[in-house]
Image (cartoon, coloured by chain):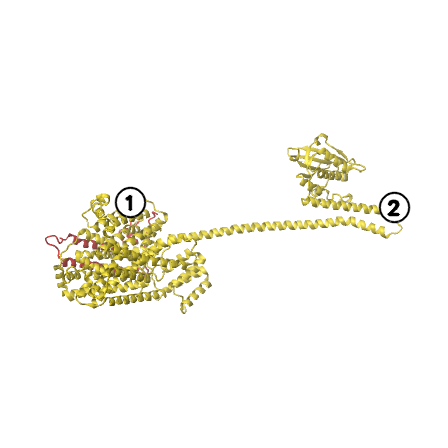
Amino acid sequence: MASLNALILVCLLYVALLFGVAFLADRAALQGRSGKWMKSPLIYTLSLSIYCTGWTFYGAVGYAARSGLEFATIYLGPTLIMISWWWGLRKLVRVGRSQRITSIADLLSARYGKSNALAICITLLAVVSTTPYIALQLQSITLSFEIFADADPTSGFSEQNTVFWVACGLAAFAILFGTRNLNANERHHGVVTAVALEAVVKLVALLAVGIFVVWGIAGGVEATLAQIDASAIGAWQVMPGRWTTTLFLAAAAFICLPRMFQVMVVENVDERHLKLASWAFPLYLLLISLFVVPIAAVGLHVLPDGANPDLFVLAIPMHQGQDALAMLVFLGGFSSATSMVIVAAMALSTMMSNHIVMPYWLRYRSSRVSVSGDVRNVVLIARRLSIAAIMGLGYLYYVLSGGGTALATIGLVAFAGVSQLLPALVGGLFWRGATRNGALAGITIGFVIWVYSLLLPALGDGLLPADVMEQGPWGVGWLRPQALFGLHSLDPIVHAAFWSLGSNTLIFCLVSLMSFPSPIERLQGAQFVHVFEHSTGPRGWTGSVAQAEDLMVMSQRILGASEAQAFFDDERNRQGVRGGLPEPTPGFLERLERELSASIGAAAAHAMIGQIVGGSSVSVEDLMAVADETAQILEYSSKLETQSTELADTARQLRDSNEKLTQISAQKDAFLSQVSHELRTPMTSIRAFSEILRDVEQMQEADQKRYAAIIHDESLRLTRLLDDILDLSVLEHGQVQLNLRSVVLADVLTRAQATALTGIAQPIDVKRDGDREEIKLFTDADRLAQVFINIITNAQKYCDAEKPVLKISVMHTTDWIHIDFIDNGKGIDKEQSQLVFEKFSRIRPENAGGAGLGLAICREVMQRLNGEIEYFAHTTGSCFRVSVPIHQEI
Amino acid sequence: MTAPDSDLIHAEGRIGPSFVNQRTYRRRRLMDMARLLPLLGIVLLMIPLLWSAADDADPVNMSDAFVYIYVVWGGLIALSLLFTWAIRRWAQHWTTEPTGKPETPSVPHHPSEL
């Protein structure tokens, strides 16, 4: 008899073997060397066998020993699903692949408009309904240990301790297997290969026991059939309600169980694998269950009364002294339990980290994630913690439920729980009218009824008090958990399945009919329901070289030919491939995506690579992300456009300023040359006459006086010129101080007239307006007088009439006071009239006494006084009009 | 339920031809088979419910029931294998025109009820 220690050693060796297989398969997949066998449909078919857990392995015989052939429904349900693969599973797998689905929660949330609320709800449901299942595996391993321990009295076996350590071991196993690395499409080649190996082990073990029982103990087929008829389960005894219900629940759970979804949809490499699986997996189920009834019948016959029928598979070989067979059976049961726990924990941890942990982690993190490795670490940690938590829950359930319930009951409880996803799943795949609210409402109501009418009663006395079970809560009889609305004659499973799935489906349909889906939901709905029209057929997977070429062509378009070539060469060197193109390994694709996203944005890069490598369609989310990026680029380019317009404006302004500066510079040059010219004339006279005075001796006194007078006059003229220039400069630079006060116009005119005409032999005849001039002005009287003096002096100087007359008339409009100075001379030529206010312009240079700055100064003065000075050609002569704004009048 | 295969989706109000060529006809019957197979399975598996049970006077023997269930099961697997073989053959022979051109897939109907 094998000792317990030997058993543990064999277990550890077996686990090491599985781990080695998984490691090799993962490495092969990573290096792109995955051989034909790894992508073969056989591996896929065998991996589906995680449906057959410890429940199948041990529990099926117990189930058969208690209820006869009813156990077969658990395998007939999946068989029906598999043979309807053409219009059922094929669609599910196609949707899963084209939408890059990572879990059943992801599938439903994607179908119903990427609703995270729905995903969280499904994740919770999945965790709650998988927990009993994991407890079941703990129980089956513990029981099988126990049976060995009973046979080995030297071992200090304790059930509680064993359960705890088994749970820890399985958690460690699942963490090591399932979260070794992160794969973009959540495929785990290593795990799938190990699971396929385990599938073979458990099938071989059960077949071996079956053959041993039929031909070794019973003595042939005929004898076995006879023994079956003679046993306690010798007659057909199936409750129709239970038969149909379990058939239905098994079929539903087969597609809704998170772990089944994981291997069937997520880990699917090629949807054509379904073709083999459609008959090979039912065959596997048939073979694994073929000997269940014989084993049960022979077990009931051979083993002592009171032996646990759940352990017949193990007990019969041990009873018959077949140690090697018992060890094989133990390994088979161990395989069933471990493979289920690993895949279930992996699938659940993916759901928990993707839909619960990561969204909240990202939301509550203040700074944005910049390094991708950062997130990957968080995801891995989240998954590991999730696995630990799931195993913890399973252990807790085992302890709470006492571990005594028959395996089959726990399994059916879990099936009924997870079947609550069926209406939303089928509705989502086949009915475009199904909405998120409908799915959420249906699943919630079904979940609540399932918990109330099946899970809590199954947990034992602790959670639902006995009086609630018997009289209903608060004594309301029709709310009794196992007899809702008075349906008390039904089996608890049938009752719970009827009420939970019935109301689930009803509410789902009603709410869907009444609610209105969001645009994303409607698009996704169309994508899912018409997936065969929206996606291409299964890709050939004819080899990765074609993909590498596609990638190369795409990269050349985006990065440019030489850059793409350099990038691919670099990658080829890194991979150590000689010649040709590098293998599209995950690492390479990641680097390429990063490279491309620098050019076209992350979402677009992801979508493009996904199109080439994954054969998946571009989802609405992808398109929206691409649109977002495009919008950002558009915004950026419009900003650039605005900036460039601004720059053009600035450049034009600069050009204008430059032109102005050039003009001003030219004006300054002209002014300087004019000033030097004007200064030179008197200076020349002064120098010439002063030289004469110095050099000529014996000059007559009269000449001396005359020359001295000339020098004096010229220096006076020079002084006047300099005064004028200074005056003009002061005016032009706005530095003039105005002495504003209230004056009467007549006084200013009188003073100007007196100043201008004093000491002149024949003064011009000035005609004034008299009373009209009696206007009070608020102005600088001296400056205004300066203007008037200038005009009167000019009239005196230039008026060539025989009897020169200057008429000064005052006009009064609403805004202005116009003072016109009209003489009776010839006036100024038209072309010259435009220049009279320019500096150094002289109308008649021959009789010029001044420097030609007078009128320029006048114009500046009037500008300072907010007035104007204009020249008009008048009928009788020239006319200067001085206008003073009226608002300065007091 | 909507049939997934494109040529089974008919536009509403569009009357298809009464006679289709043999290839299309074969394919449609193949799809019929795909849909009928699970129905057949369900019906066959419901038959035991009509049998008299253990508490009746003349119950059906467990061995007979056992044989019946497993024969039905095996039959379903065989039919499924046949179907798989049929679509493989269809894929190899019937999707190629006599000229050697691959059959162009029929244009799928997109219900525009978005």
Q: Residue furthest bottom?
A: A578
Instruction: Report which colour depicts chain A.
Output: yellow
Residue bearing mark 2: A702
Q: Check the residue under mark 2 and report the chain it is in.
A: A
Q: Give the magenta part as a residue range.
A: A506-512
Quarter holding the C terminus of chain A?
top right
Instruction: State which tag comes first along the sequence, 2 or 1.
Output: 1
- Of B46 and A194, nearer the camera is A194
Q: Is residue B70 visible?
A: yes
Res. A318 image quadrant: bottom left
Q: Where residue A510 is drawn, which disc sits there? A: 1
Q: Is residue A113 above or below residue A339?
A: above
Q: What tint does the image give chain B?
A: red
Identify which amino acid the numbered label 1 is placed on: Leu
Numbered disc 1: secondary structure? helix
- Classify A713 as above or below B95: above
Q: Secondary structure at mark 2?
A: helix
